[in-house]
Image: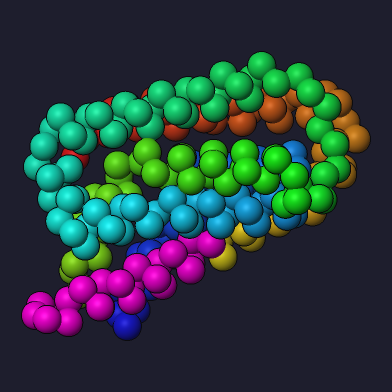
């Protein structure tokens, strides 16, 4: 496996983006289990992009401005919804280490998957980046699946690490109401900024 692929993938995954931000938010607001769930959900959200790349759908997304715009603005709308709901949320943040056994686990999974599912740049990543490290011929698809599995594993580990670190300091954060309010607004603003950045992305 190429060192260049591993290093580039690590940089892409470790650079704070929508998935990392959501894992951090889950860790701070719901605890370690929710952070791991968020990381898992973000990883699952990459699978449709992988399937699109393998089946050639990514080529359509890359070539069609309309298809790219539809997916992009759906992602923008969802990020703005996340920003709005986070900003308006005034519920108390409480320790909920049983989140994986309650309905909140489903909410974490759905939001995490949707955030990555509606990110068209991931499809372009699988379509434009991975093939550079895939040999031509009959072994191309198995090689692409193998590299994608490595990328997804890196995604889960990095997102889970972000979320676990956030969960480790949540007690100190939650004991300060003003900090909690500022943190909530910061996350809302971050989702809005990510929405704006995605809105101006081009193919």
With respect to residue 100, does 118 lie above or below?
Answer: above
Magenta segment includes 137: yes
* Residue 181 in view: yes
The x, y position of residue 175, in whole percent, is 90, 35
The x, y position of residue 39, in whole percent, is 57, 54
Res. 139 image quadrant? bottom left
At a point 11% along the width and 37% down the height, the residue shown is 64
- Count of marks overlaid on the render: 0
Which quadrant of the rendered structure holds the C terminus? top left
Q: What stretch is highlighted in magenta?
A: 135-156
Asked whether 175 or 143 is in front, the reply is 143
Name of the residue lying farthest toward the right: 175
Magenta segment includes 141: yes
Report the colour scheme.
rainbow
With respect to residue 149, does 168 lie above or below?
Answer: above
Res. 25 image quadrant? top right
At a point 58% along the width and 42% down the height, the residue shown is 22
The x, y position of residue 187, in whole percent, is 61, 31
Q: Taking 85 as reference, is 135 left or right?
A: left
Which quadrant of the rendered structure holds the N terminus? bottom left
Q: Taking 107 as reference, is 41 left or right?
A: left
Res. 78 image quadrant? top left
At a point 18% along the width and 69% down the height, the residue shown is 132
Q: Taking 137 as reference, is 94 left or right?
A: right
At a point 12% along the width and 81% down the height, the residue shown is 138
What is the magenta segment's predominant secondary structure?
Answer: helix
The x, y position of residue 159, in whole percent, is 57, 56
* Residue 15 in view: no
Asked whether 63 or 191 is in front, the reply is 63
């Amino acid at each position: 496996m190429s060192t260049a692929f591993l290093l580039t993938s690590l940089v892409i995954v470790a650079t704070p983006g929508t998935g990392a931000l959501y894992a951090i938010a889950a860790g701070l607001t719901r605890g370690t289990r929710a952070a791991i769930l968020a990381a898992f959900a973000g990883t699952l959200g990459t699978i449709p992009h992988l399937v699109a790349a393998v089946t050639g759908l990514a080529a359509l997304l890359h070539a069609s401005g309309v298809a790219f715009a539809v997916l992009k603005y759906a992602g923008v709308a969802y990020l703005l919804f996340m920003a709005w709901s986070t900003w308006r949320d005034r519920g108390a943040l409480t320790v909920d280490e049983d989140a994986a056994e309650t309905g909140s686990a489903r909410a974490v999974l759905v939001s995490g998957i949707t955030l990555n599912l509606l990110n068209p740049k991931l499809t372009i990543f699988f379509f434009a980046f991975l093939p550079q490290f895939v040999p031509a011929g009959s072994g191309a698809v198995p090689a692409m699946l193998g590299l994608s599995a490595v990328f997804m594993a890196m995604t889960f580990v990095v997102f889970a690490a972000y979320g676990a670190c956030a969960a480790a300091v949540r007690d100190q954060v939650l004991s300060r109401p003003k900090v909690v309010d500022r943190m909530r607004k910061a996350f809302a603003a971050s989702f809005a900024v990510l929405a704006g950045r995605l809105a101006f992305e081009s193919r």
